[in-house]
Image (cartoon, rainbow, N blue to C red):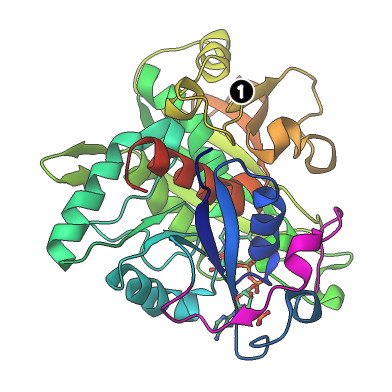
């Protein structure tokens, strides 16, 4: 029997860290062997240090594992990072320099020219940036990132449309879940009976990341896609699942049926390679007039799909629709694990 790949989690006690533990519980390829968090948690057991917020119980194997500092060396072959951006940049670079593959959720390195911003269904080709990165930085380790939680749900819906018809412009207004702000996150008195029309740093990420993800890799670099994105981001009183109201202008003519067909038929490398965490349907299009809804639909395909609904014509642009994505699964830990599975399949781990 093949030995499992040993995994370390940086930021293991956080909202995303907990999802990593849940999704890696019983994973056929990966085994968690190291956990790290802040000084506050260091030397405590996971059970003592972590305010577990998931509805599934904390797995037994993790309860007594000790928390370590976010420093090399850690007893693992690969590092998943879900650290706050205030320190993720330096810590992740240090792990990569020390030879570890670093699979990151944080925003720090996403837009670096030699770092893949990976959505395996869309741009598996961008993994070639790893060779560029290793050579430029003269190191064996590397950093691969997954997009912002709002971006990933959006680009999975946009990718098949871009491929078939070309996109000219996108306007998106988001309604983002509380778990996206980490724990303890937004104070209850700020969000009960309320909507907050500001999420620090979010709009520029949603406006820039899709262009890199849908960009073309050639001659060692990614040329960003040429469409424009305008985003307005709101925090709403939902536990998990970001909802997005999207309006798009296309380069070529299409019908509503065309749009639904390309989204429903969308498949990529994870589906071809039958990766363990790959959703069978990366994009699900719901036909009911009042769906998708976060509480009802965020767990479709175990939280790994983008759920689209209300595809219809628009009075100003060409089409509009609603997008829903699970922000801590496909928007964070699940995305990073799928990235790692692709890295294994392609021989990078
Ligand atoms: P979180 O709940 O606040 O968790 C932060 C984690 O980082 C905790 O494990 C915390 O450990 C650790 N940490 C904090 N300060 C540290 C320090 N100085 N040194 C070492 N470790 C430290 O945040 P989160 O929501 O999981 O988000 C983590 C990262 O993922 C962020 O960069 C975020 O932007 C990104 N992300 C989040 C989501 C989402 O939906 N939540 C989606 C995509 C990306 P202690 O418990 O010891 O404090």
Judged from this view, the residue extending furthest toward the front is 1
Residue 25 position, x and y percent, is 70, 50
Does the residue tagged 1 have its C-beta within 8 Å of any atom of ligand 1?
no
Q: Give the residues in magenta.
A: 51-74
Residue at screen point 40% across, 35% down? 345
Q: Is residue 248 above or below residue 241?
A: above
As for residue 60 lying within the magenta part, the answer is yes
Determine whether 107 is above or below 190 in the image.
Answer: above
Q: Nearer the viewer, residue 135 or 45?
A: 45
Pick the quarter of the image with the N terminus: top right
Depth check, front residue: 34 or 331: 34
Quadrant of residue 110 within the rendered picture? bottom left
Residue located farthest toward the bottom when viewing the structure as drawn: 39
Q: Where in the figure is residue 221, as x and y percent of width and height?
A: 17, 47
Q: Give the x, y percent position of residue 180.
A: 66, 61
**Main SS, magenta residues:** loop
At 75% from the left edge and 81% from the top edge, which residue is drawn? Answer: 49
The residue under the point 42% across, 45% down is 229
Residue with the mark numbered 1? 280
- Closer to the camera, 115 or 241? 115
* Magenta-colored stretch includes residue 63: yes
- Asked whether the viewer can see residue 168, the reply is yes
In the rendered image, residue 237, in percent from the top left (x then y), is placed at 82, 59
- Figure quadrant of residue 144: bottom left
Compared across the picture, whether 178 is left or right of 33 comes to right
In the rendered image, the vertical position of residue 27 relative to residue 276, given as above or below:
below
Is residue 225 something that shows in the picture? no
């Amino acid at each position: 029997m093949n030995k499992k790949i040993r995994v370390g989690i940086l930021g293991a006690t956080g909202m995303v860290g907990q999802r990593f533990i849940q999704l890696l519980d019983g994973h056929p390829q990966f085994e968690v062997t190291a956990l790290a968090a802040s000084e506050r948690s260091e030397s405590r057991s996971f059970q003592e240090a972590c305010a577990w917020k998931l509805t599934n119980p904390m797995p037994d194997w993790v309860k007594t594992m000790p928390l370590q500092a976010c420093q090399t060396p850690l007893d693992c072959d690969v590092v998943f990072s879900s650290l706050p951006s205030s320190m993720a940049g330096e810590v992740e670079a240090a792990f990569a320099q020390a030879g570890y593959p670093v699979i990151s959720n944080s925003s720090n390195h996403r837009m670096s020219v030699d770092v893949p911003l990976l959505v395996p269904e869309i741009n598996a080709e961008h993994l070639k940036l790893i060779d560029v990165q290793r050579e430029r930085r003269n190191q064996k380790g590397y950093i691969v990132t997954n997009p912002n939680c709002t971006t990933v749900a959006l680009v999975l819906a946009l990718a098949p449309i871009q491929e078939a018809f070309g996109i000219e412009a996108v306007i998106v207004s988001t309604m983002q879940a509380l778990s996206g702000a980490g724990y303890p996150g937004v104070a209850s008195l700020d969000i009960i009976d309320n909507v907050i029309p500001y999420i620090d740093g979010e709009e520029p990420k949603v406006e820039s990341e899709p262009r890199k993800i849908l960009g073309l890799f050639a001659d060692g670099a990614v040329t960003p896609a040429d469409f424009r994105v305008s985003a307005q981001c709101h925090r709403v009183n939902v536990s998990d699942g970001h909802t997005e109201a999207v309006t798009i202008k296309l380069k070529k003519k299409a019908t509503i049926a065309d749009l639904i067909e390309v989204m429903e038929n969308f498949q990529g490398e994870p589906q071809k390679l039958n990766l363990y965490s790959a959703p069978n349907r990366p994009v699900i299009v719901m036909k009911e007039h009042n769906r998708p809804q976060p509480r009802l639909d965020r767990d479709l395909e175990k939280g790994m799909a983008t759920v689209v609904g209300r595809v219809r014509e628009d009075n100003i642009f060409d089409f509009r629709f609603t997008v829903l994505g699970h922000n801590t699964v496909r928007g964070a830990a699940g995305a990073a694990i799928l990235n790692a599975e692709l890295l294994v399949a392609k021989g990078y781990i």
